[in-house]
Image (cartoon, rainbow, N blue to C red):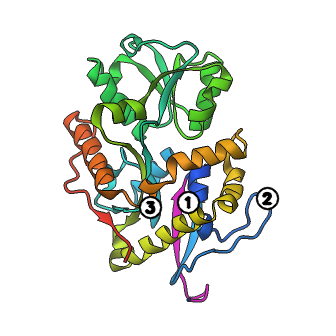
């Protein structure tokens, strides 16, 4: 293994939430929030990973200028940066009959959403892409609702406070919204899976293309990190709890299980089909640019 002075620094951008913390625990090389000095749990070879923790909308924005060598991003965002980044075959977040939700103080039919003010976590989040596709199925467009971008971890509180008629929630809010007295209007992951027969591909990880022949080796290290976390689940969940908002160990473990699973190890054929289907529908709806063939970097 190369010494730290010889290793190439790679910045890896991800959200400060339990599933991403769980996935990349084995790559942690920093002082954790609890004060513990962490070192990588897997062989990182010629690379040293520097974690950049930001919400997904911020990471989507940063991907526009290809600032980070490795980054989480929304599948909604990927077609806009496909010339700069390639998706990795591992590290995905898939909603398999569950996913982002529209929640409100009182449930209503999607046909009644016109004219309502909705808090959304970002214009390039996959949650918003899926919602736009669902609106179109009801003969509506984004112009038929008023939407405001709100940090994802504030949406539930601000809907409960009456600042918005409804909110589009992601991350662990999918497990906690009822505590705030909110009801689910629609589960977009459930709608997508039941109508398309595929999981909803929410987020992926991508490597900057200028790393060229190094990409497979880097992908291999990323996969090793995910495998370590799954093989050492209790240890990795304890670490991930430091990034959990208002949930205890049981809910954190459940949330991690929702988004770090077989799909995260590899999209597989069905996962790749799901990405292609979502992107194609986005292109057909004039929401996404045509990015050509979608390629996936595999470990090597």
Q: Quadrant of the N terminus?
A: bottom right
Q: CA distance from mark 2 to mark 1?
A: 18 Å
Q: Residue at x 39, y 54 (%)?
A: 64
State whether residue 27 is above or below residue 150: below
Mark 2, secondary structure of its residue: loop
In the rendered structure, find residue 265 and report the number of the disc placed on it. 3
Q: Which residue is mark 2?
A: 34
State whether residue 217 is above or below residue 6: above
- Residue 239: x and y, percent? 70, 58
Between circles 2 and 1, the one closer to the viewer is 1
Mark 3, secondary structure of its residue: helix
Residue 128 in view in this figure: yes
Q: Residue at x 35, y 69 (%)?
A: 298
- Residue 165: x and y, percent? 53, 16
Q: Residue at x 46, y 64 (%)?
A: 70
Q: Residue at x 62, y 50 (%)?
A: 18
Mark with earlier residue (3, 2):
2
Mark with earlier residue (2, 1):
1
Q: CA distance from mark 3 to mark 1?
A: 10 Å
Can you name the residue that lies furthest to the right here? 35
């Amino acid at each position: 293994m190369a010494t730290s002075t010889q290793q190439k620094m790679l910045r890896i951008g991800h959200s400060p939430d339990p599933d991403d913390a769980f996935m990349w625990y084995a790559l942690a090389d920093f002082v954790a929030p609890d004060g513990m000095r962490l070192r990588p749990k897997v062989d990182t070879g010629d690379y040293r990973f520097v974690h950049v923790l930001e919400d997904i909308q911020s990471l989507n924005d940063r991907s526009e200028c290809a600032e980070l060598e490795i980054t989480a991003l929304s599948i909604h965002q990927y077609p806009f940066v496909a010339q700069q980044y390639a998706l990795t075959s591992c590290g995905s977040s898939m909603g398999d009959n569950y996913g982002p939700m529209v929640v409100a103080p009182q449930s209503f039919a999607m046909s009644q959403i016109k004219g309502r003010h909705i808090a959304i976590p970002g214009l390039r989040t996959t949650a918003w892409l899926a919602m736009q596709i669902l609106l179109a199925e009801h003969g509506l467009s984004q112009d038929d609702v008023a939407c405001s971008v709100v940090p994802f971890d504030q949406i539930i509180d601000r809907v409960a406070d009456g600042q918005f008629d409804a909110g589009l929630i992601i991350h662990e809010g999918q497990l906690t919204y009822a505590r705030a007295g909110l009801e689910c209007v629609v589960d977009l992951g459930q709608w997508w899976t039941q109508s398309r027969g595929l999981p909803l591909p929410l987020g992926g990880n991508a490597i900057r293309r200028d790393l060229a022949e190094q990409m497979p080796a880097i992908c291999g290290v990323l996969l090793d990190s995910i495998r370590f976390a799954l093989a050492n689940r209790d240890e990795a969940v304890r670490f991930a709890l430091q990034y959990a908002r208002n949930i205890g160990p049981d809910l954190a473990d459940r949330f991690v299980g929702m988004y770090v699973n077989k799909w995260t190890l590899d999209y597989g054929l069905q996962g790749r089909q799901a990405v292609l289907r979502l992107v194609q529908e986005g292109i057909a709806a004039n929401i996404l640019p045509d990015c050509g063939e979608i390629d996936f970097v595999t470990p090597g």
